[in-house]
Amino acid sequence: MAIIETRCLKKTFGKIEAVRGIDLDIEKGEIFGLLGPNGAGKTTTIGMLCTIVRPTSGRGSIAGFDIARQPTQVRRNVGIVFQDPTLDTILTGRENLELHARLYGIPTSVRKAWIEEMLELVDLKGRAGDLTKTYSGGMRRRLELARGLLHRPAVLFLDEPTLGLDPQTRARTWEYIRKMAAKEHTTVMLTTHYMEEAQAVCDRIGIIDAGRIIALDTPANMIDSLGGDIVAVAAPRPPLEAIRSLPYVSAVKMNEETVEISMKSAHLHLAEILSLIPDVISVEMRKPTLNDVFIKLTGRDIREDTVENGGGWVEAAARYNQRGR
Ligand SMILES: Nc1ncnc2c1ncn2[C@@H]1O[C@H](COP(=O)(O)OP(=O)(O)OP(=O)(O)O)[C@@H](O)[C@H]1O
Ligand SMILES: [Mg+2]
């Protein structure tokens, strides 16, 4: 049985259909990414699965426990890192973890050892005795990750875990997430706007738009569905017929002065292609991204804020806070 399962899960807020019937089967140990524009329903979906938001209809379960009928058991099995930081800044890093350990009833016999283990994992041992308000943004995020995993939940939900961090800290945070997931066989469901990162870190991705999952697959399969890499060559007289007749070329398109050639494993064919084209001015080889997948499916860019009724992570974070944790 899937560790996260939903069937026709829906949530409406008055007239707003935030989530319009979602079916998911996520296996134990999987890192699953929910990717979509502002207001698509990502935070609402996670909220329902964590029992913070009550579904309007449909059902869902975590580790076999029903999210509507068995919220206590569900909560015991999940860890959450919210879109908005929620640490107590007048406590030290270690105290924040101690507080969480008490709230979750982690037995005193293992409490200290588990806390030290988590601090070690996120490289915060040296600063664990300092007040959290003296931490940098990246250190706080790491402490939140450690806290989310401290009670060893079967499922960890991460809502925009790297939002606002610098690229290096983002890369390291993903490293921690992967390391932690591997160590405890934790199932991770995350949302992110950083598509390259979702591509690199997730086993499977669900693209969500206006409350519906419009694609669900491995990042590699999604990208393959676009017909491979794109080689863009600027040249005055590209021999289009000769290029088209190459067996590995899946599409050829003229874009002003540039010929765009799609193929799988472009790096293997680049030399042959260039040998066919006289007077090359410039060459660009690029892999399609998940954003290209999103554009193909919806006709627009994932980064455009497409939902009129609010959206935006600041508002979403504020709503999370209002929901009363
Ligand atoms: N408590 C609420 N009351 C009213 N509308 C809500 C509430 N929570 C969410 N919504 C609406 O539901 C829709 C989905 O919001 P949600 O926060 O799930 O989106 P999201 O995909 O997480 O977006 P973002 O990328 O901006 O975080 C939006 O139209 C939002 O305005
Ligand atoms: Mg959100």
Image (cartoon, rainbow, N blue to C red):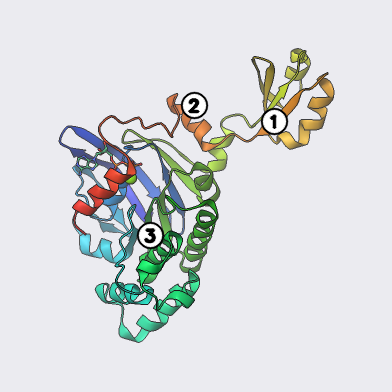
Residue at the spot of label 3:
156
**What kind of element bears circle 2?**
helix
**What kind of element bears circle 3?**
strand
Mark 2 vs ligand 1: CB below 8 Å: no
Say if 123 sits above or below 160 in the image: below
* Image quadrant occupied by the C terminus: bottom left
| Residue type at tag 3 | Leu
Name the residue nearer the viewer: 88 or 300: 88
Residue 311: x percent and y percent? 30, 38
Is residue 153 in sight in this rendering? no
> CA gap, disc 3 to disc 1?
39 Å
Upstream in sequence: badge 2 or badge 3 = 3
Q: Quadrant of residue 277?
A: top right
> CA gap, disc 2 to disc 3?
31 Å
Tell me the tag on residue 296: 2
Residue 71: x percent and y percent? 21, 60
Residue 216: x percent and y percent? 45, 39
Residue at point 80% right, 26% down? 274
Ligand 1: give its quadrant: top left
Upstream in sequence: badge 2 or badge 1 = 1
State yes or no: discs 3 and 1 in contact (Cβ < 8 Å): no
Residue 250: x percent and y percent? 66, 24
Badge 1: residue crowd in 10 Å (few <14, some 14–19, many ≥20): few
Residue at the spot of label 1:
284
Is residue 120 in sight in this rendering? yes
Tell me the tag on residue 205: none
State yes or no: discs 2 and 1 in contact (Cβ < 8 Å): no
The extreme front residue here reads 134
The extreme left residue here reads 14
